[in-house]
Image (cartoon, grey):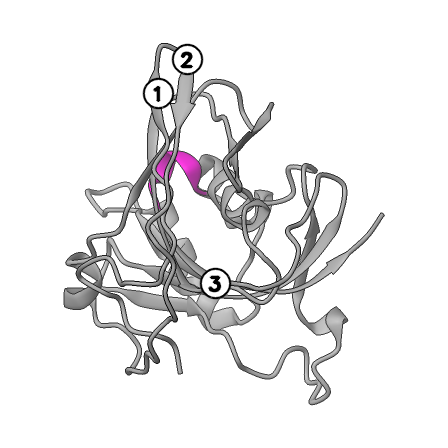
Amino acid sequence: MLPSPQPNPTPGVEFVVARHRSSEETCFSLPSQPLPELSAPIPTPESLSQLNLPICQRLEGRIMARQKCGTRTTQKLNRDFNIRMQDLRPGNGPKPNIGETVVVDWDGYTIGYYGRIFEARNKTKGGSFEGDDKDFFKFKIGSNEVIPAFEEAVSGMALGGIRRIIVPPELGYPENDFNKSGPRPTTFSGQRALDFVLRNQGLIDKTLLFDIELLKIIPN
């Protein structure tokens, strides 16, 4: 069961806010306390639309550089964008480095359009009941295999953590085609739901929400 979206920052959840000030980034984190138990049904469109998550601004270059800011790795992107993120469960292991392969499980929601889910965590992958790595999504940090916001989130996570991000269209799938960059839905119904939103030429809001769990880090 996924933790429910929190309308206000939750004590014990670490946040980072990076702002552009004369080409400099600053960051801070809230005091760390034990994370409360969170349990709720799958988020509704109404609850998702009311999320008040911390804003992380990224700029300049498309994943061209990383900087250490305290204990959090930040990335620079080519324009001013807002990535809202919240650690639903802080990890207690190492963080991935450039060139390392990560194994993740993830949820995806079209929160800009009825909050439809297009990928679900904690489900059987590829017909396997053993939870093998091959059944989960994996990619190499720094390889541009996934959309910028997804890599931004995972590269700053600690092993075992679960992070929620809200992704604006500018940091989502290139040319509104999920086949050109990961992560991709693993079911036909999920592909249809995501493809409908991405390819729609109307006024559909293409903002997406991802919940990402970092399961494993594979060294070079």
The Cα–Cα distance between marks 1 and 2, rounded to whole angstroms, is 6 Å
Residue ID at (26%, 64%) = 115
Image: magenta residue range:
167-172
Q: Secondary structure at mark 2?
A: loop
> Relative to the observer, which residue lies in front, 90 or 53?
90
Measured as percent of width and height from the top left, residue 16 is found at 38, 42
Residue 21 vertical placement versus 91 (above, below):
above
Sequence-first disc among 2 and 3: 2
Residue under label 3? 90
Splitting the image into 4 quarters, where does residue 26 fall?
top left
As shown in the figure, which amino acid type bears the numbered disc 3?
Pro
Left or right of 219: which side holds 201?
Answer: left
Residue 212 vertical placement versus 181 (above, below):
below
Residue ID at (52%, 64%) = 161
The verdict on residue 206 being magenta is no
Q: Secondary structure at mark 3?
A: loop
Residue ID at (34%, 54%) = 31
The Cα–Cα distance between marks 1 and 3, rounded to whole angstroms, is 26 Å
Left or right of 113: which side holds 154?
Answer: right
As shown in the figure, which amino acid type bears the numbered disc 1?
His
Q: Secondary structure at mark 1?
A: strand
As shown in the figure, which amino acid type bears the numbered disc 2?
Ser
Within 10 Å of the Cα at label 1, are there few (<14), some (14-19), or many (20+) other Cα atoms?
some
> Relative to the observer, which residue lies in front, 137 or 88?
88
Splitting the image into 4 quarters, where does residue 117 fall?
bottom left
Instruction: Please give the label number shown on residue 20.
Output: 1
Residue under label 2? 23
Within 10 Å of the Cα at label 2, are there few (<14), some (14-19), or many (20+) other Cα atoms?
few
Asked if the residue at tag 2 contacts the one at tag 1, i.e. Cβ–Cβ closer than 8 Å, the answer is yes
